[in-house]
Every structure is written in C-alpha cells, then in structure tokens.
C-alpha cells in the first residue's frame, strides 16, 4: 500500500512539474510584464523620463509620424502612436541597466495594440561597444559624444486588442549592427533629446523576418521628496 501511495505521489509530482516546464517562455514574460510596473521615482533610478512623440521627420514633414513601427508577415504592420491614457516611461538605474515600457495603437486602427517592454545593460557613453554603430540622424548629424548606449538588450512585443496572439522577442546583437541609444538627436527624426532603436530579428545565419523602429522624445520625470512633495527631476547623473 505504501509503495502504491509513493508511486501515485511521484506521478502527481511529475505531472505538475511537466505542466510548469511545458509553458512557453513568452507567456511567462507577458505575465511578468503586467505584474511589474515601472517606478520612475525608484530609489535606484538615476534618470527617469516620460516618452513623447519626437515630432515629424525633419527632412520630410509629410512622413508618417509615429513612435513605433513594425513590418513583417506575422505582425499588424504599420505606424503606431502612444495609446491614450497610458504612462510611457523609461528608467535608467545606478547599476547600469535600463527599463522601458509603453503601449501603442495603430494610427489607422486603434483596436490594434502592442505593449513594448525593453530591458537593457552593457552601458557605454560616446560610442557603442562590440562593433556596433550609432543609427544616424540626418537632421543634426551624429555627434554621439554625450550619447548613452545600451548594447545588450531584450525587447518583447506583445499584441493586445485585435493584435492579441502576436508576440516576438528582439535581442542584441542584431543583424543591422545598431543598438539602443539616448541623446540629442538620438531618436533619428528630430534634433531634440530622445531615444531611438532600429530593430530586426536577423542572425548571422538567417535573414530578418521582421524589422521596425522606436523614435521617442524624452522629457525628465518630476518626482516628489517624500512628505514634502517638492518636485525634482530624476536626472542625477549619467
């Protein structure tokens, strides 16, 4: 009887373990993203920003102004803008990492939504590492002296609304040899202070199946000193 009970217990343990192991990674990432809101006034933050549209493309004001775009057979391709009544944020931490999160809707169909989660590390100032190159801004040139680069990153693109079921991960290094950049002109559309990324899923042995970009203006986030609530900017240092 004891042997039978032990055998049944092993079967139950194996079933539970197998169920947890068989869950796909994207589902775990999506659950984590929803339960881990960014705190722009985190005690470990050195710079926090609200994200805004960078403005029209400087050489061609009639270009499709956007903050996110994606093109590929598995996506609802096109230009996207920030979803209304959301708080798009970017936070840099004193351990040399960064987190960014924002929600977007398609410019022509607001039922098509994506949530973008970005985690970066391997921070450098002035130039990217690992043989990467800055993405150029033809409005202001590419003076990257004071730009900040996060050369290792993981970005997830999660479909919401009528885009539900669409999911992708973008990891560095990419096929286009660019990485995430912050600085004056870094959004690649205007000479304002912003951030930008040209992304794809190419590898050394396979071509890209999708590509896109992020173009945002960065506005320092105002926090409050506890119990006094005197606004201050979370922009202590690089």
Image: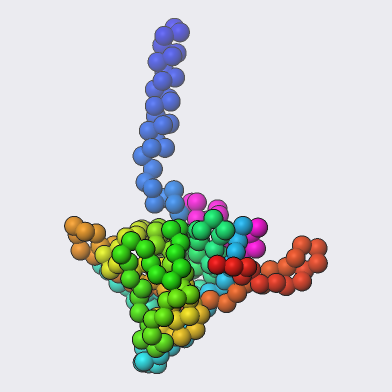
Say whether residue 119 is left or right of residue 60. Answer: right
Residue 121 lies in quadrant? bottom left
Q: Image quadrant for the C terminus?
A: bottom right
Examine the rendered structure and indicate whether residue 94 appears above or below residue 81. above
User: Residue 57 or 152: which is nearer the viewer?
Assistant: 152
Q: Is residue 214 above or below residue 60?
A: above
Give the image location of residue 40, x and y in percent: 61, 64
On the question of residue 162 being in view, the answer is no
Indicate whether residue 36 is drawn in magenta.
Answer: yes
Asked if residue 4 can be seen in this view, the reply is yes
Q: In the image, which residues are magenta?
A: 31-43
The residue under the point 40% across, 70% down is 127
Residue at image position (48%, 80%) is 184
Displayed quadrant of residue 41: bottom right
Of residue 212 and residue 221, the one placed in the foreground of this image is 221
Badge count = 0
Q: Main secondary structure of the magenta part?
A: loop
The quarter of the displayed image where residue 44 is located? bottom right
Name which residue lies at 50% across and 55% down: 33
220 on left or right of 129: right
**What's the residue at 36%, 92% (across, down)?**
60
Does the segment drawn in magenta span residue 93?
no
Against 156, is 135 above or below? below
| Residue 85, percent from left and from top | 58, 73
Residue 71 appears at what percent x and percent y?
30, 72
Image location (x, y in percent) of residue 73 = 26, 67
């Amino acid at each position: 009887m004891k042997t039978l009970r032990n055998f049944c217990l092993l079967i139950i343990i194996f079933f539970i373990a197998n169920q947890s192991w068989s869950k796909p990674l994207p589902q775990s990432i999506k659950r984590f993203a929803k339960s881990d809101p960014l705190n722009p006034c985190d005690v470990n933050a050195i710079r926090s920003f609200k994200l805004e549209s960078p403005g029209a493309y400087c050489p061609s004001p009639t270009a499709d102004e956007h903050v996110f775009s994606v093109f590929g057979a598995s996506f609802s391709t096109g230009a996207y803008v920030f979803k209304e009544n959301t708080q798009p944020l970017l936070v840099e931490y004193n351990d040399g990492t960064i987190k960014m999160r924002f929600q977007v809707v398609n410019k022509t169909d607001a039922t098509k939504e994506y949530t973008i989660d970005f985690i970066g590390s391997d921070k450098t100032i002035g130039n990217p590492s690992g043989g990467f190159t800055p993405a150029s801004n033809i409005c202001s040139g590419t003076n990257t002296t004071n730009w900040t680069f996060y050369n290792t990153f993981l970005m997830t693109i999660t479909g919401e609304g009528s885009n539900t079921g669409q999911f992708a991960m973008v990891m560095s290094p990419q096929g286009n040899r660019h990485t995430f950049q912050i600085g004056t002109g870094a959004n690649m559309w205007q000479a304002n202070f912003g951030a930008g990324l040209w992304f794809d899923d190419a590898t050394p042995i396979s071509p890209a199946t999708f590509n896109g970009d992020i173009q945002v203006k960065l506005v320092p986030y105002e926090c409050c000193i506890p119990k006094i609530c005197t606004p201050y900017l979370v922009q202590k240092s690089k």
